[in-house]
Amino acid sequence: MKENPARRAFVKKGACGAAALAAGGLLNFNSSGLAEAQQASPGHGVTANKEWQQLLTPEQIIQLAKIGNQRFVSGAPIQRDYQRDIRDTRKAQYPVAIVLSCIDSRAPAEIIFDAGIGNIFNARIAGNTVDPDVAGSMEYACKVVGSKLVLVMGHTSCGAVKGAIDKVQLGNLTQLIEKIYPAVEALSNFPGDKSSHNPQYVDAVAAKNVQLTIENIRKISPILAELEQQKAIMIAGAMYSVKNGKVDFL
Ligand SMILES: [Zn+2]
């Protein structure tokens, strides 16, 4: 059997094929099994293939995201061969998740999750809110391409959230940040200073905005809501810290 180079990252040294995939921890997935498999192939990245996309559950994909973020935070990301990733994904892509995050330059999803090329879709808009176009992108990812996780990722010190708190008016930005107003209003009882100068308040509004965006995804997209009810996908939320690089799942 011709070994897929991308698969090497998941399997134990010296093994190949489906049995090795199981031995490498993917079929009997657990975090230590996967970490062990990845350590067995230092220097190799991971590019999702059709088999993995079908095998992985949404819960396992969240676990993969957590492990990838741990690698990122610990300063030990996988040393990737991007040219090989390009070759492996030349004919098709099998990303396991779509991440909706802010445009903030400090919050690039592929790097934060140490995900490389071909593993996740990445939708970015200031304030990580959803509209029909963003929902359509998620429908493409999940219904057409087979991704199983929709992850809405807000972040600390978000400028769009601060703008919503301050009710900034500026060109097209005005209507964009109005989408965050419901999160601001939902925290009207926040104890303490309710200003954009209070980091705790800003981050609490951002977390609320993640929760409300998830609810909006379900409202805007009956397709995604149905996939979630069938447990074919999971719609989850997370907050990224620009201070330490850590992602906390909500
Ligand atoms: Zn932001």
Image (spheres, rainbow, N blue to C red):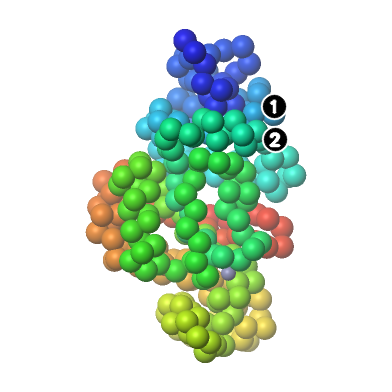
Q: CB at mark 2 closer than 8 A to ligand 1?
A: no
Inspect the image, locate mark 2, and give the three-letter code of the amino acid beneath it. Answer: Gln
Q: Is mark 2 in CB contact (under 8 Å) with mark 1?
A: yes
Q: Is residue 246 above or below residue 187?
A: above
The label shown at residue 97 is: none
The residue beneath circle 2 is 79
Occupied quadrant, residue 186: bottom left
Picture coordinates of residue 14 (x, y %)? 61, 11
Query: What residue is at 35 percent from the left and 42 percent from the top?
Result: 145
User: Which mark is first along the chain, 1 or 2?
Assistant: 1
User: Viewed as shown, does residue 155 lie left or right of 56?
Assistant: right
Q: Is residue 21 above or below residue 29?
A: above
Inspect the image, locate mark 1, and give the three-letter code of the amino acid beneath it. Answer: Pro
Question: Tag 1: Cα neighbours inside 10 Å, few (<14), some, or many (≥20)?
Answer: some
Occupied quadrant, residue 15: top right
The residue beneath circle 1 is 42
User: Viewed as shown, does residue 188 lie left or right of 197?
Assistant: left
Which quadrant of the frame does ligand 1 lie within? bottom right
Nearer the viewer's eye, disc 2 or disc 1? 2
Observer able to see residue 102: yes
Is label 2 in a helix, a strand or a loop? loop
Is label 1 in a helix, a strand or a loop? loop
Q: Is residue 207 above or below residue 35?
A: below
